[in-house]
Amino acid sequence: MNATWESELTDFLAELSSVQRTTLDVLGRKRATLVAADTKGLAAISAEESQVVDRLTQCLRRRQALLARAAAEGLPNDSLQSLASALPEARSSGITEQMRQAALRARLLRHEGLVNWVLVQRTLIHLSQLLEIIATGGRLRPTYSKEESLRPGGALVDREA
């Protein structure tokens, strides 16, 4: 019974490791295309992202199935780590090391995701500022003014302004 659990956990962690590496690769390429403002490259990466999401979803379902089966067998089922620690062979087979490596890659994935999010947010802020400059003709309006002589409209709305 424990050998079966060991084998299943090892297989699951190998698949998770593969998906994590693929995700890191996709996020790295996405970062490069964001920096280069390569819209065609971003469109191409979109399909790969969908495949990665599908694989991650499959890993999540498999994890849930493993934990549900562990609960049915009376084994610890709050996490895969607690399940592995309940198996005597898990320590000697390297499962705990695989889990440690998976946790480190998960942390790196969060970091890469955050980097990409920051790049996208900075790009959106920049584009918003450009649109504001275009819309106002580059003239700044004071926040407070005693005079109401400011002309409403911008270069896009009123070409004369």
Image (spheres, rainbow, N blue to C red):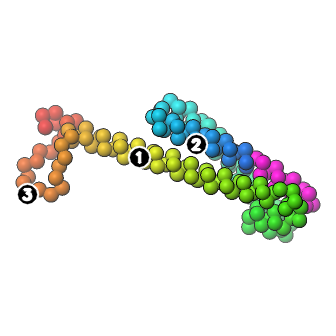
- 143 w.r.t. 35: above or below: below
Quarter placement of the C terminus: top left
Spatial separation of the CA atoms under disc 3 and disc 2:
51 Å
Label 3 neighbour load within 10 Å: few <14, some 14-19, many 20+: few
Which labelled disc corresponds to residue 27? Answer: 2
Q: Earlier in the sequence, mark 3 or mark 2?
A: 2
Residue marked by disc 3: 146
Q: Earlier in the sequence, mark 1 or mark 3?
A: 1
> What residue appears at the point 82 percent right and 52 percent down from the top-left corner?
10
Which labelled disc corresponds to residue 122? Answer: 1
Residue 132 x, y percent position in the rendering: 27, 43
Residue 158 visible in the picture = yes
> What residue appears at the point 81 percent right and 66 percent down from the top-left corner?
85
Choose mark 3 or mark 2, whichever is in front: 2
Spatial separation of the CA atoms under disc 1 and disc 2:
17 Å
> What residue appears at the point 77 percent right and 54 percent down from the top-left corner?
98
Magenta region, main secondary structure: helix
Q: Which residues fall within the magenta stretch?
A: 1-15
Q: Residue 102 appears in which quarter of the rendering?
A: bottom right
Amino acid carrying mark 1 in the image: Arg
Residue 160 x, y percent position in the rendering: 12, 34
